[in-house]
Amino acid sequence: IEEYKDANVDNDLVAIADALADIQYFLLGTVLYHGMEHIFEDIFNEVHISNMTKVNPETGEVTKNSQGKIMKPSHFVEPNLEPIIKGESNG
């Protein structure tokens, strides 16, 4: 991630691409290490659906704090990962 941050500051697309590939390599290796390769797509999709509940359905916008972090609104829905991990998912 530091490699990516440095490359981004330098606006070096080659270094950015290399850093992103390294991040992906780490992610996939970690997924394999934890034996989640057969459920990771379902995990990602559940988190994505949850993240999309941060968007205001009326305006299509998100609320950010003073540091630029997207805030969880009252209609936010937490991801429900336990059924996926326990093998109770239909995914």
Image (cartoon, grey):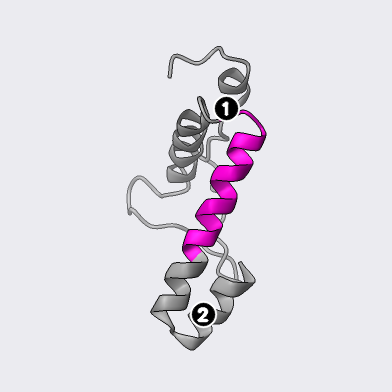
Mark 2 element type:
helix
- Distance between the Cα atoms at labels 2 and 1? 35 Å
Query: Is 35 drawn above or below residue 8 in the view shown?
Result: above
Q: Give the residue at mark 1.
A: 80
Instruction: Give the class, few, some or many, for how many residues have Cα within 10 Å of label 2's Cα (few <14, many ≥20).
Output: some
Q: Main secondary structure of the magenta part?
A: helix
Query: Is 32 drawn above or below residue 73 in the view shown?
Result: above
Q: Nearer the viewer, mark 2 or mark 1?
A: 2
Identified at 54% across, 48% down, the residue is 73
Quarter assignment of residue 52: top left
Q: Is residue 29 visible?
A: yes
Mark 1 element type:
loop
Q: Give the residue at mark 2.
A: 7
Identified at 53% across, 52% down, the residue is 25
Specify the segment rendered in magenta. Answer: 20-36
Kindly indicate whether the residue at mark 1 contacts the one at mark 2 (C-beta within 8 angstroms): no
